[in-house]
Image (cartoon, grey):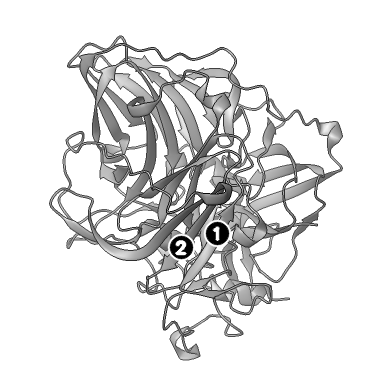
Amino acid sequence: MREADGLSRRRVLGIGGALGLLTATGLTASAALARHPAQTGTELRSAVPLPPAYRVPLPVPAVLSPTDTAGGVDRYEITQRPASVEILPGVRTPMWTYGGGFPGPTIEARRGRTVRVTHHNELPVPTVVHLHGGHTPAESDGYPTDLVLPDGWREPAAHDMPGMDMSGGHGMDDPHAVRTRRTRHYTYPTDQRATLLWYHDHRMDFTAPAIWRGLAGMHLVRDDAENALGLPSGPRELPLMITDRAFAADGTLAYPALDPTLRTTPGVREPYLAGVLGDVILVNGAPWPVHEADAARYRLRILNASNARHYELAAVDDAGRRLDLVQVGADQGLLAAPIRHRSLPVAPAERYDVVLDLAHVPVGGRVRIVNLLGTGRTRDVLAFRIVRRAADRSRIPRTLATDLPTWHRTDAVRVRDMAFRAGRMDGGHGWLIGGRPFDPARPDVTTRLGDVEVWRLVADVHHPVHVHLVGFRVLSRGGRAPLAYDGGLKDTISLRPGESAEIITRFDGYRGRFLFHCHNAEHEDMGMMANLTVT
């Protein structure tokens, strides 16, 4: 067993403060955090002057063109490389990028057509790419030890890595890992419902700082059934990647890494162990942007790609009135029928597909998307400024999809209990599943291909729990019915402080080694991840 080694690798010995409080007081502390759900973490403050809200135009990431489409396979090339990117107006920020920009380029896939993405690693550290929400074979799922090593990479010496497990470090001792030098081909069969996915780095122990530095992009799956619905499309369909960041005085990204090179010691400084929050809200890489819009319906493909920040989004006009956010889809595609919300909570890694109707907003008027969980500058997100009247032939059908799975509790061959909590190990603190930190060599959950299971989850603080490979339905929260925003097929569930929930899924598609974990990225790096093996 390597549990103690795994914890030392994440430097959880000596972690105190908030984690110690949670371990000692349990749900009492969780009840207090429930009143401040955006604060499962500590906010960094920028040291550079920040622009006013709603001045920077909303960018839309470029759609990547395939290099080849022969044989029913769409082939793409992406180079992971450092780049200087203008995030704040007039300020250059060095970032790690997919293709030179942030976010990375968007891939638009067609259901039934295989996508093959070749990634070239020109960064100074190993990387792994995970297609979040993809129904992906294990060899392309982005397991955190399946590293793409940069040219010239040599494992750091023991004296450079205090407190780490030197049987290999960074999971290099994982006997099942597949490592390549500089290049790796990821194959995605695209045998799944139309939806918004996203791709991001998933390297062992360093996922959080790698995403923070820019390694994230969007991946859309489309099909004919969705296209026939008449939902807003073209320029009135907007992918929105929402993130938070903080900036140092020289314009670089601030992040409290123990090792800023991300080569040796993983982890963050003690005040940030519950999660890292930024004070600048970015949408598609722009701070508090504005979009010049028609007086018409818009389809907003919302992704929370923040490390730890939760949002509760609302659309507010100049008179302070809220407009409906009409949800048409969830993480894994379209709902059966639309659901109207006055506000929408979005946890890290969750996606929501909503329609916002601007038809009755006067030309010159403005609608702001605000974060009801934010304070000060983090309450602002983006704005729409109405610049013209326009014809609108889009619609929101009463029936959106008829292909949602109908699993019932009685279909489950087993029920599993999972606890996501801060815990103690060898006198230290960590973020654990079932009282144990992640170990790539240990089997945690083993199921059979085609089995239906119910998982009962419980949390101490906010934990957005993500399951690889499959989508699931939420059966209950706290023994009661799911909430309005739990509808549809999901791959990430936001567990609130002290909350329990039940989910049901069928493990179909592929055999192999996958993962489930908290998508608070700092929690994930500090042990809150487990193996899922499908046989």
Instruction: Check the image and report above or below for 310 versus 318.
Output: below
Residue for badge 1: 186
Category of crowding for the residue at label 1, using alpha-carbon neighbours closer than 10 angstroms: few (below 14), some (14–19), many (at least 20): many
Amino acid of disc 2: His
Amino acid of disc 1: Tyr
Instruction: Kindly report the distance in space between the C-alpha atoms of the residues bearing marks 1 and 2.
Output: 8 Å
Q: Is residue 61 left or right of residue 4?
A: left
Q: Which residue is drawn at 45% across and 76% down?
A: 265
Residue 202 seen in render: no
The answer to which image quadrant residue 400 occupies is: top right
- The count of marks equals 2
Category of crowding for the residue at label 2, using alpha-carbon neighbours closer than 10 angstroms: few (below 14), some (14–19), many (at least 20): many
Residue 302 seen in render: yes
Q: Position of residue 11 (x, y in %)?
A: 52, 73
Q: Nearer the viewer, residue 517 or 228?
A: 228
Residue for badge 2: 119
Residue at the far front in the pictured view: 70
Q: Position of residue 186 (x, y in %)?
A: 55, 59
